[in-house]
Amino acid sequence: MKKQFTACVWQEDNWFVAQCLEVDVASQGATEDEALANLQEALELHFTPPVATILPQTHRIEVETGVA
């Protein structure tokens, strides 16, 4: 299924940054076209379901926060 997204593109120094406005995904490139192509690839990867090569394991960890 294909869906259209809106991209905002701007230049930072020598790089063009392309950010999807509907999904928190961004990419960059040396040209505006390259940044948009990289964003398209990043969005396709974002929406590709993960395929685990081993079963996931759940762990509990303890972290010192300094808050009582």
Image (cartoon, grey):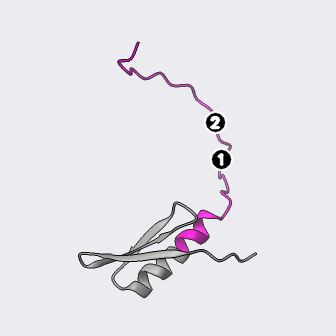
Name the residue rendered at 36%, 86% in the picture: 31
Say how many tags the image has.
2
| Magenta stretch holds residue 42 | yes
- Residue for point 59% across, 67% down: 45
Q: Is residue 38 above or below residue 60?
A: below
Q: Position of residue 10 (x, y in %)?
A: 36, 76
- The secondary structure type at the circle numbered 2 is loop
Given the image, on which type of amino acid does mark 2 rest? Gln
Residue located 57% across and 63% down the image: 23
Answer whether labels 1 and 2 touch (C-beta < 8 Å).
no
Residue 16 placement (x, y as % from top left): 35, 78
Q: Residue at x 64, y 64 (%)?
A: 47
Residue stretch in magenta: 41-68
**Left or right: 2 as drawn, with respect to 45:** right
> To which residue does mark 2 refer?
57
Q: Amino acid at mark 1?
A: Ile
